[in-house]
Image (cartoon, helix red, strand yellow):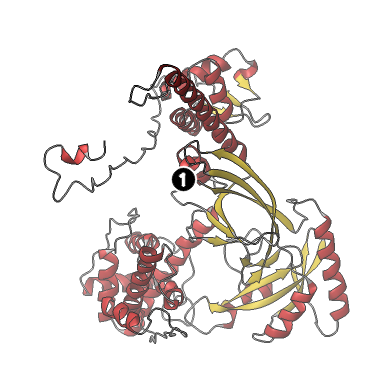
Amino acid sequence: ADKAVQQLGRVHRSNQVHPPRFAVLLSELGGESRFVSSVARRLQLLGAITRGDRGAASGVSGELKSFDIQNRYGKRALDSFYRILRTHEDFPVDLDFVGPRRKFKEAEQFYKAAENALMSIGIRLTTDERFDESLKESKTLNAFLNRIMMLEPSMQNCMFGAVQALYNHEVGLDQEAGLYDEGLETLNKRCGQRVEVELSDSKVLFTHPETGAETTHLKLKIDRGFSWTCASKLFEQRAGEIRGDGFYYWKRGGVETPVLAIAQARKVSYEDDEDSVLMTLYSPRDGAISKLPGSSKRLTHEELTEHPALRRASAERDRLTLQRAWEAQFDFAGQMPVGSEESRFREEHLLGGSVLNVWGAVGSIVQDGSSGKSSERIPLIRAQPKNRKEAVVGVRVDARKLPEVQYALHALLQRTAMETQAQAEINAVVADHGSTGARIAPSVPAVDPPSYESVMECMEEHLKDRPNKCDEGWMSWVQVHAHMVNIGRADHSEQCVVAVQHWVNELIRLRVFIVDDVSGGIKVKEKAKGCGWYVPPPKPKPLPKKPAKRGKGAGRGRGRGTRGNNACNLGD
C-alpha cells in the first residue's frame, strides 16, 4: 500500500493543468479488497493530515472509499461474524449465496463450511476489537483478509461477502440513529439533487472578551421540493436504464402523489441482479427519497415494483395529468408553514463562528442531538445560501436543544460581563494610585461546581412540597441551574453549567427523577416500598474530563529538556 501511494503521488504533481485519473482493476476475488482497502485508508489519512480533509488527498480516494473497511465498522462486522459462527444465531441481513438454487441452501450449511474453512487457515473465532474506536488498523481484520486468499474462490467470496454485508448493516444502524460520521455534510446536495438554501436569520449569541470572536446562531431555510421541470428533464435523461423506472402514483394518507423512480448506479450485491438495484424516488414535496417511511433499508427495484402503495403510471398517456398533479402538489407544499409535515420547506439551526471557545459548555448538548444518544461525532454542516455570497459552516443544533444552547451561552456571557466589570474597576484603581508594575487578576466570587449528591439534594428539596412532587416549569437542566444560581449553590461559570447539565441528565437517565408524561416537567420517582430487598443506589457516569493544556514547547514529556521540572516550567 505504501508503494502504491508513492506511485500515485509521482504522477500527480502540484500545479498540473490536468490531474491524472486512476482506475483500479479488481477481480471478483474478495481477498483482493485487502490491498485496495489499505490504499484507500492511507490516501484518506494523507488528506486529513495535509489539508484537514479526508477526501482531499486525490480523486482516487473518493472512488476507493467504498472499499475501505479498516475502521470501527469493519471491526464490529468481523466480531459479529465470528459471534454468529459461534452461536449459529440468525444472520441480521440477507446473504446472496444462501437460499434455493444457490451455493448454500440454508444458513446452517454456510456456518459449518465457514467454521471449517477458518480452522483450515488457522483463524480462531475470537476478537477483542469490537469496541476499539481508534484509527489503528485491525490486526485481526488484516489476518482475516490475508488468509482467506488461501481458500478456493467461491468460499473466499462468500466469507468476504458475509463480512461486507455485516459492515453495511452496522453503518446503516448508525445512520438511522444519527451517529454516523460522514465528515463535512453539504446541505446543497441530497441524493444527487440540487437543494436551495436560504439564510433566514443570524444572531450573535456570545462574544469572546479578549479576542472579540463571535459565536453565531444561523437559521437556514431549505427547499427540498422537486419541480416538474426538473422531474421531466431527469426522466428524459435517465428513464429506460432499467425495467420499471419512470413515474408512479404513491398513495400517502389517502391521497395519490406522483413520484419519479430512477435507478442508482450502485448495486446492492455482486450479482448483476435487476431486483437488487437501488432506486431513488423524487417527490414534489420531499425531493429525493432513498428509503420509504417506516423502512430501515434502501429502496430496491423489487420493493418498488411490489409495494402495494405504489402504482405505475404511463408517462406517454398520462403526461398532462401527471404534470398538473405534480405542479399542484409542489405549489400546495410551498404554501404550508415552514417545518410542517405538508411543507416542502424545513429549517436547520447551526452554531457558527467561534465554536471552540464555547464548546466546553455546549458540546454535550449538541452531540446528544435528536438521536437521544451521546456520541463523539461533531455534526459539521456546510451550505451555500442563495442570498449570501460566502458559504456558511457550522455545527448542527437540534431545534429542541436550541433553548439549552442559548441558555448556556447566555450564562457564559453573564460570567464574562462580571469579569470585565471587575477588571475595569481594578484598572480604575490602578490609574488613580499609580501602577505597581504587576498585573492584578480580577476577583469574581466563584462557586465550586456542584456534585451529584448536591444537585440531587437541591432538586429533592425543591420538588418535595410541589403537587405530585412535580414542577411543570422544570423542563430540563436549564431550570435546575437557574434555581441553583438563585439560591447560591451554583454560578454562571462554564464548570458549573457543565456540572449541573451532566448531573441532571444522569439523574433522569438513572430514573432518580423522571419526566412527567402529561406536563413534561421533572418529578421525583416514587420509591417502591415493602420489597424486602436492599437495592443499592445507581452509580452515575463521571463528569467528562477536560483535556489538559500543554505548555508551549512542553511536547509529550520525551526527548531533550524534560529532565527534572524543566518541562513543567515551560508552560508557566
Closer to us: 570 or 243: 570
User: How many marks do you count on the picture?
Assistant: 1
Question: Residue at the spot x=45%, y=75% of the render?
Answer: 98
Closer to us: 342 or 349: 349
Question: Residue at the spot x=65%, y=86% of the render?
Answer: 241
Read off the residue under disc 1: 356
Q: Quadrant of residue 443?
A: top left
Q: Position of residue 259 (x, y in %)?
A: 75, 71
Residue 490 lies left or right of residue 243; in this view the side is left
Quadrant for the N terminus in the image: bottom left
Q: Position of residue 167 (x, y in %)?
A: 42, 65
Q: Secondary structure at mark 1?
A: helix
Quadrant for the C terminus in the image: top left
Residue 531 in view of the camera: no
Question: Residue at the spot x=26%, y=79% of the render?
Answer: 3
Q: Against 416, is 136 above or below?
A: below
Closer to us: 331 or 511: 331
Q: Against 92, is 11 above or below?
A: below
Closer to us: 493 or 70: 493
**Three-letter amino acid code at the position of disc 1:** Leu
Residue 445 in view of the camera: yes
Question: Residue at the spot x=73%, y=74% of the render?
Answer: 260
Q: Position of residue 140 (x, y in %)?
A: 26, 64
Q: Position of residue 43 (x, y in %)?
A: 36, 72
Residue 148 lies left or right of residue 398; in this view the side is left
Mark 1: give few (<14), some (14-19) or many (20+) Cα within 10 Å.
few
Residue furthest out toward the top:
465
